[in-house]
């Protein structure tokens, strides 16, 4: 299968609701979702020779259905919590975005960076990926998207005057991280680094173990990132 329709939809989503609602985009995304519904790694193993291929199937399904649910006019008034629990057809069965997160975790419990691809549509969540994941380039895409997320406004915030380092609550959703705050901050600093100058400023201000800074978590803005294009009426 090809993931090009998802990449097309992601490019459109970055341009806004009107682009995502374009007939060419909606047709391509609908066809892609239909393909995902027809089979998957559990029923068509020959099409998923590597574990990476199976993993990206479920990650891409989450991204694709996030776009579809977020742009569905029938769900225009739903909050993200509702979207996460809305069932849809997948791999000859039915799943939800919440269940897909569990599936990804079961397949890759040691790589917390995958959570950065699993924003169900929160305004304050990690940015949507620029393109669909591919099994052959998974490692590179994980690194690139992590750097992109680390550079996103609000993911890291250093207040040098008050010795405070803030990290987005997205980190609280990432699995396989240390339980203690300092350990978690240090791990995320390596996995989801801010731009180089910011990283150096954090090291200089907070110390190599971040022991000189007060570590705080920035609450996650759970308002909707995606809104369907609502029909407008009026006289010409």
Image (spheres, rainbow, N blue to C red):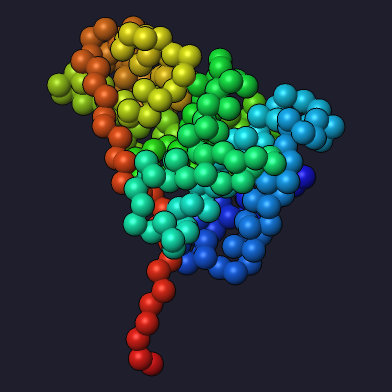
Q: Is residue 17 visible?
A: yes
Residue 153 is drawn in which quadrant?
top left
In this rendering, position of residue 168 left or right of residue 49? left
Q: Which residue appears farthest toward the front when viewing the image?
A: 93
Up-down relation of residue 26 to residue 155 (above or below): below
In this rendering, position of residue 187 left or right of residue 68? left
Return the x and y of residue 227 as percentages of the image width and height: 40, 57
Q: Which residue appears farthest toward the bottom when viewing the image?
A: 236
Return the x and y of residue 80 as percentages of the image width and height: 38, 44
Q: Quadrant of the C terminus?
A: bottom left
In this rendering, position of residue 124 left or right of residue 12? left
Q: Quadrant of the N terminus?
A: top right
Return the x and y of residue 158 as percentages of the image width and height: 26, 26
Residue 170 is drawn in which quadrant?
top left
Up-down relation of residue 100 to residue 4 (above or below): above
Up-down relation of residue 145 to residue 29 (above or below): above
In-front residue for pair 5/185: 5
Residue plotted at (33% across, 29% down) = 168
In-front residue for pair 112/65: 65
Return the x and y of residue 122 as percentages of the image width and height: 38, 42
């Amino acid at each position: 299968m090809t993931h090009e329709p998802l990449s097309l939809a992601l490019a459109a989503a970055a341009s806004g609701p009107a682009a995502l609602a374009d007939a060419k985009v909606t047709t391509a995304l609908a066809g892609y979702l239909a393909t995902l519904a027809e089979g998957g790694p559990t029923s068509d193993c020959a099409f998923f020779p590597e574990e990476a291929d199976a993993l990206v199937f479920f990650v891409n399904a989450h991204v694709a259905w996030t776009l579809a649910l977020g742009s569905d006019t029938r769900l225009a008034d739903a909050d993200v919590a509702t979207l996460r629990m809305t069932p849809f057809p997948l791999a000859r069965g039915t799943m939800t975005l919440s269940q897909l997160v569990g599936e990804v975790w079961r397949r890759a419990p040691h790589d917390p960076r995958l959570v950065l691809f699993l924003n169900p549509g929160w305004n304050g969540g990690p940015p949507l990926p620029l393109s669909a994941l591919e099994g052959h380039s998974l490692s590179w895409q994980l690194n690139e998207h992590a750097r992109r997320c680390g550079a996103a406004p609000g993911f890291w915030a250093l207040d040098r005057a008050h010795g405070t380092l803030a990290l987005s609550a997205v980190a609280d959703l990432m699995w396989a991280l240390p339980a203690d705050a300092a350990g978690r901050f240090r791990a995320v600093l390596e996995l989801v680094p801010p731009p180089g100058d910011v990283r150096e400023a954090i090291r200089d201000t907070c110390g190599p173990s971040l022991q000189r800074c007060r570590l705080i978590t920035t609450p996650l803005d759970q308002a909707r990132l995606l809104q369907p294009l609502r029909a407008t009426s009026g006289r010409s």
